[in-house]
Image: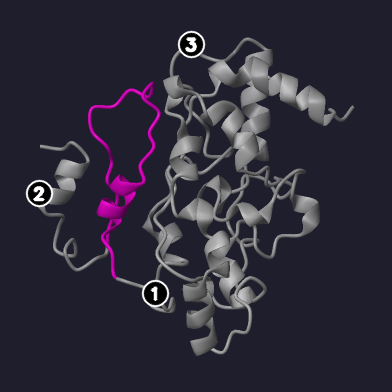
């Protein structure tokens, strides 16, 4: 039997202490012309074909606790959270006009990188998902319903660990890589500036302090600075020696 929204909220409250996985959103630079009018989020990998987008406010229920890193507050204070809002600014309207776009808040060429789940059917959006919230958690981590259900089920069955909960890749993309950022942050964007993935990731990093780690995996970066091997500055960002 399908749960009501109130029942889901109750489960969220009960499971909050068990959900310990952090989100790592990518940095934000410019207008969404980078992906082009025909691009959508629909083709992004997801654990299951019927996995739905749940929205940042649902993520907050478990990823808003200080003891697990309060990833929601980190996102809320980022430019990603204001990605849709910024399309109404004078600067965005001016840039859009130069590109032949009448209204950036309505143009697919802009919305494709300034909202989450662009091009995804309404049937794949779980209420009260709101695209106007900008580039949310799921823009980088993929739809979150499978993750939410799996963590709730573990908590309900008493299987949730006291410490960090290792999450299966079938649930969610726990650590997005540079290729996720580059879908929008690329040469096709009118405001694009070449960037070092390591520096950008460190700038918006929002880790779960309960996850055991001595250093961070800084991943691959294709910027000119890192092309021949990462310099010491990148390794320092990850706490490497």
Which mark is nearer the camera, 1 or 2? 1
Residue at 63% x, 84% y: name it.
102
Dot 2: element: helix
Residue with the most extreme front position: 90
Q: Quadrant of residue 148?
A: top right
Query: Outermost residue toward the right?
Result: 1
Residue under pointer 3: 162
Residue 7: percent from left, percent from top: 80, 23
Any mark on residue 232, and which?
2
Q: Which callout, 2 or 3, points at the residue further toward the start of the chain?
A: 3
**Mark with earlier residue (1, 2):** 1
* Mark 1, secondary structure of its residue: loop
Q: Quadrant of the C terminus?
A: top left
Give the overall secondary structure of the magenta segment.
loop
The residue singled out by tag 1 in the image is 191
Name the spot of residue 64 as percent of width and height, x first: 52, 29
Q: Quadrant of the N terminus?
A: top right
Please state which of the two labelled residues, at mark 1 or mark 3, is closer to the viewer. 1
Does 69 appear in magenta? no
Give the residue drawn at x 41%, y 53%: 26
Asked if residue 130 is positioned above or below residue 83 in the image, the reply reads above
Bounds of the magenta span? 194-221
40 or 16, nearer to the observer: 16
| Whole-number angstrom distance, CA of label 2 to CA of label 3 | 36 Å
Q: How crowded is the residue under tag 3: few (<14 C-alpha within 10 Å), some, or many (20+)?
A: few
């Amino acid at each position: 039997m399908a749960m009501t929204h109130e029942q889901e909220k109750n489960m969220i409250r009960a499971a909050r202490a068990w959900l310990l996985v952090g989100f790592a959103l990518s940095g934000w630079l410019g207008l969404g012309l980078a992906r082009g009018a025909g691009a959508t989020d629909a083709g992004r990998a997801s654990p299951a074909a019927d996995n739905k987008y749940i929205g940042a406010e649902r993520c907050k229920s478990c990823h808003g606790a200080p003891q697990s890193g309060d990833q929601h507050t980190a996102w809320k204070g980022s430019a990603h959270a204001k990605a849709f809002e910024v399309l109404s600014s004078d600067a965005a309207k001016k840039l859009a006009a130069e590109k032949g776009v009448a209204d950036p808040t309505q143009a697919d060429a802009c919305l494709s990188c300034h909202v989450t789940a662009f091009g995804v059917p309404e049937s794949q959006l779980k209420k009260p998902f709101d695209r106007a919230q900008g580039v949310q958690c799921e823009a980088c981590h993929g739809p979150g319903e499978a993750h939410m259900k799996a963590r709730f089920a573990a908590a309900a069955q008493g299987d949730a660990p006291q410490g960090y909960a290792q999450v299966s890749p079938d649930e969610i993309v726990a650590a997005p890589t540079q290729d996720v950022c580059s879908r929008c942050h690329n040469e096709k964007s009118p405001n694009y500036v070449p960037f070092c993935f390591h520096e950008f990731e460190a700038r918006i990093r929002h880790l779960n302090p309960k996850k055991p780690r001595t250093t961070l995996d800084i991943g691959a970066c294709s910027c000119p600075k890192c092309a021949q091997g990462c310099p010491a500055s990148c390794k320092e960002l990850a706490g490497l020696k």
